[in-house]
Image (cartoon, rainbow, N blue to C red):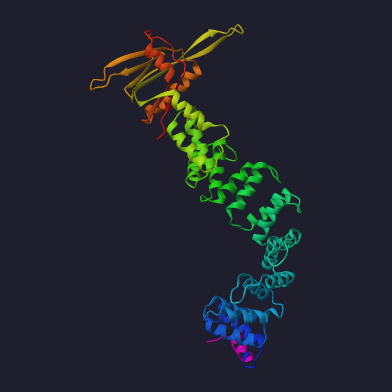
């Protein structure tokens, strides 16, 4: 049963009442007080349009343009847009301008599009204002004029048009011959874009950068970090930036594992900066333990990918790595035994008469390595064994390195070894080829090896 409001509208519509016809079209379209029926909605809209209602004319045009509930007909759509445009219907002017700009249902004509956009823009149509700005900014149907473009971008942006806010923000961020750079205005526009729910990762990244570097705003690492997160995992720049902030503890707690994870995500998308950071991790620094470690082959792989993707290796780390790979001999293996003892003595301070505590650390371990070598550390002597090939692996040569390990070095070595044992990880020694060859040629097994580093192998 129809409600009284619908019945009254139908009675008025029977007399040709334009507004009643239009209202019935709205009711059947939205289901307000009656079941949705698009065929009836179109019928009432069309009757209202034929009676001269500009809004109904625009809506009928959209029905024909979209091809929903009626057969798609772009020429018929433009006919109805033309009728509505003659009554200065802003939506019709905008839609007709779009169609002349793209040649939909008519011959493309940028000058006609420009004229129609201009009329709609002056009626306050935000999308038309943005498109008019685009026409002047790119010289479509007119000479390029950045000042006029900025005027219409500003009008559109003030009404909340996201595209206009982004474009105008870019203009003020970069500056140009006719428009002075203004980071404060750029920041304000990018922030409005994001606050209104703008989805583009590139804009969020730009705003995050401005917070990070304090451009046009007060520097704020926390807000930068949150915006990089919002930009999404499929944005390689955001992923690289999050890796950087986790690595350096900026805007969040320092977390090397998270840093590597985000660098890997960015690197999978070809980000050259992320690839380079991963190369540095493998070349120089173990982020998990805060210790130096070498995984030279992995580092070389990442360096080469980073450079191939456009990274400029100004520090020439790849060249340094290649030289290291030619210079050092690598022994890798699994720690088979390890013990660590920490003691301390009270000694007289040389600087004053007070007694101070001096820590001492001693430890022992052995590694069965590749390439026929093994390593054994005991009582602060480093023994390097060159094993004969064959089933028995008899020791052919041994080198005892008399090397006094200072407290900080001992702590570092013991931390690596304990971690290796506890987590069943392989370990790597990197030893100077020159020194090792010198030992091979020497009859003195007690020659000191100075150039040795110890590191965990990455999984």
Q: Which region shows up in magenta?
A: 1-12
Q: Position of residue 346 (x, y in %)?
A: 51, 9
Above or below, comparing residue 443 to residue 160 in the picture: above
| 310 on left or right of 341 | right
**Residue nearest the viewer, comparing 412 with 370:** 370
**Left or right, residue 181 beside residue 108:** right
The image quarter containing residue 63 is bottom right
Residue 375 visible in the displayed image: yes
Compared with residue 91, is residue 187 higher up or lower down, i.e. above or below?
above
Instruction: Residue 378: give x, y in percent of width and height.
Output: 38, 15
Q: Is residue 239 above or below residue 30?
A: above
Which of 215 and 294 lies nearest the eye of the viewer? 294
- Residue at the outermost bottom position: 15
From the image, which quarter does the C terminus lie in? top left
Q: Position of residue 180 (x, y in %)?
A: 76, 51
Between 297 and 277, the residue placed more toward the observer is 297
The question of residue 160 being in magenta is answered with no
In front of the other: 178 or 64? 178
The structure residue drawn at horizontal position 52% and vertical position 41%, both measured from the top left corner, is 274
- Check residue 11 for magenta coloring: yes
Residue at image coords 29%, 15%: 396
Residue 76, how many percent across, how many down? 59, 82
Give me the residue at 61% from left, 70% from top: 102
- Give the dominant element type of the magenta stretch: helix, strand or loop: helix
Indicate left or right for 126 with 370 as reference. right
């Amino acid at each position: 049963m129809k409600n009284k409001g619908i019945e009254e509208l139908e009675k008025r519509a029977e007399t040709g009442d334009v507004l009643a016809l239009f209202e019935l079209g709205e009711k059947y379209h939205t289901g307000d007080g009656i079941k949705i029926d698009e065929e009836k909605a179109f019928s009432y809209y069309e009757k209202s349009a034929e009676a001269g209602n500009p809004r109904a004319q625009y809506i009928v045009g959209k029905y024909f343009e979209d091809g929903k509930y009626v057969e798609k007909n772009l020429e018929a759509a433009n006919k109805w847009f033309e009728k509505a445009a003659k009554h200065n219907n802003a939506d019709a002017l905008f839609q007709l301008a779009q169609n002349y700009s793209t040649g939909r249902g008519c011959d493309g004509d940028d000058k006609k599009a420009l004229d129609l956009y201009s009329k709609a823009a002056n009626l306050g149509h935000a999308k038309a204002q943005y498109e008019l700005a685009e026409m002047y900014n790119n010289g479509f149907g007119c000479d390029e004029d950045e000042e006029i473009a900025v005027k219409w971008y500003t009008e559109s942006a003030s009404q909340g048009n996201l595209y206009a806010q982004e474009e105008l923000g870019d203009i003020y961020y970069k500056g140009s011959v006719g428009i002075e750079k203004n980071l404060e205005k750029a920041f304000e526009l990018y922030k409005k874009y994001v606050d209104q729910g703008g989805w583009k990762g590139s804009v969020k990244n730009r705003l995050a950068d401005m917070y990070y570097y304090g451009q046009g705003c007060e520097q704020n690492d926390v807000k930068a970090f949150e915006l990089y997160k919002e930009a999404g995992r499929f944005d390689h720049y955001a992923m690289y930036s999050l890796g950087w902030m986790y690595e350096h503890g900026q805007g969040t707690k320092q977390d090397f594992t998270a840093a590597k994870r985000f660098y890997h995500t960015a690197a999978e998308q070809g980000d050259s900066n992320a690839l380079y950071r991963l190369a540095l991790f493998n070349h120089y620094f173990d982020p998990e333990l805060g210790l130096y470690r070498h995984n030279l082959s992995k580092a070389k792989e990442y360096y080469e990918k980073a450079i191939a993707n456009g990274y400029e290796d100004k520090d020439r780390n790849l060249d340094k790595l290649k030289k290291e790979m030619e210079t050092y001999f690598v022994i890798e293996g699994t720690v088979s035994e390890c013990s660590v003892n920490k003691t301390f003595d009270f000694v007289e301070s040389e600087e004053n008469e007070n007694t101070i505590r001096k820590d001492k650390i001693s430890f022992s371990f052995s590694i069965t390595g590749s390439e026929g070598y093994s390593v054994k550390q005991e009582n602060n002597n480093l023994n390097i064994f060159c094993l004969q090939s064959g089933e028995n692996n008899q020791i052919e040569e041994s080198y005892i390195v008399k090397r006094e390990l200072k407290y900080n070095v001992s702590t570092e070595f013991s931390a690596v070894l304990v971690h290796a044992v506890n987590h069943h990880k392989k370990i790597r020694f990197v030893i100077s080829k020159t020194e090792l060859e010198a030992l091979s040629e020497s009859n003195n097994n007690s020659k000191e090896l100075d150039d040795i580093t110890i590191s965990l192998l990455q999984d």
